[in-house]
Image: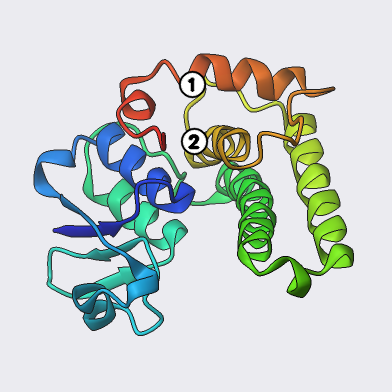
Amino acid sequence: MKLYITVPSPFARKCRIVAREKGLISRIEEIAVDPYANAPELLAANPIVQVPTLIAGDGLPVSDSPVICEYLDGLGAGPRLLPADGPERLAVRRMETQANAALEMGVKLVLEMRRPESERSPSWIARWTQNMGRALDALEAAAPDANKLDMGVITAGVAVAWIGFRHPGFDWRKGRPHLVALHEAIETRPSFMGTRPG
């Protein structure tokens, strides 16, 4: 299998962590590409030239990090990171979705700040910053526990690490002791240590 990534991408990092947790890393070639340069191999696999994109075992592309992670979870060894069904699955999906929402707001902020200053929207910057904070507050209330590893906990851990990396002026730690504890514990796992963005 081939996994097209950019090293700083939190969505790619999530897939890379799942691959390691599920014992699949020896079966996956991680290929760093530049989506903004329309990397030909990525464009051939994904018409919107977005990472992560996985070329699965059957040779077909799989895109979108939750879909890739679910595919890898079913393929790999060890306990399921995403329960098969029932209330447990919904609880994990809720946390994963909230963490992805925090990341989406953070990505919007990064892209907006890359625009020329005269083209930036202060109102959108303020809204996305507030939304990112509210998503983190919702994660804090859910109290993710690094000792109960699942797709939601992994995504929450990726989210706080990436927000700290990309938005150093945003104090994600203040008033969020559960997320601070999660970050400190989960970043010691080999799968997280081997995939840090910078």
Q: Is residue 147 visible?
A: no
Disc 2 crowd, CA 10 A, few/some/many (<14, 14-19, 20+) = many
From the viewer's side, name the closer residue of 44 and 64. 44
Describe the element under mark 1 as helix, strand or loop. helix
Q: Where is residue 189 drawn, in percent x and y?
A: 38, 19
From the viewer's side, name the closer residue of 194 and 149. 194
Describe the element under mark 2 as helix, strand or loop. helix
Instruction: Check the picture and name the quadrant holding the N terminus.
Output: bottom left
Residue appearing at x 63%, y 58% in the figure: 104
Q: Identify the mark nearer the N-term, 2 or 1.
A: 2
Please indicate whether residue 80 sits to the left or right of residue 61 in the image: right
Q: Where is residue 108 drawn, in percent x and y?
A: 66, 62
Instruction: Check the picture and name the quadrant holding the C terminus.
Output: top left
Q: Amino acid at mark 2?
A: Ile
Q: Amino acid at mark 1?
A: Ile
Please indicate whether residue 71 sits to the left or right of residue 44 in the image: right
Please indicate whether residue 65 sits to the left or right of residue 110 in the image: left
Which of the 4 quarters of the picture holds residue 76?
A: top left
Which of the 4 quarters of the picture holds residue 122?
A: bottom right
| Label 1 sits on residue | 186
> Whole-Å distance between the Cαs marked 2 and 1?
8 Å
| Label 2 sits on residue | 154
Which of the 4 quarters of the picture holds residue 18?
A: top left
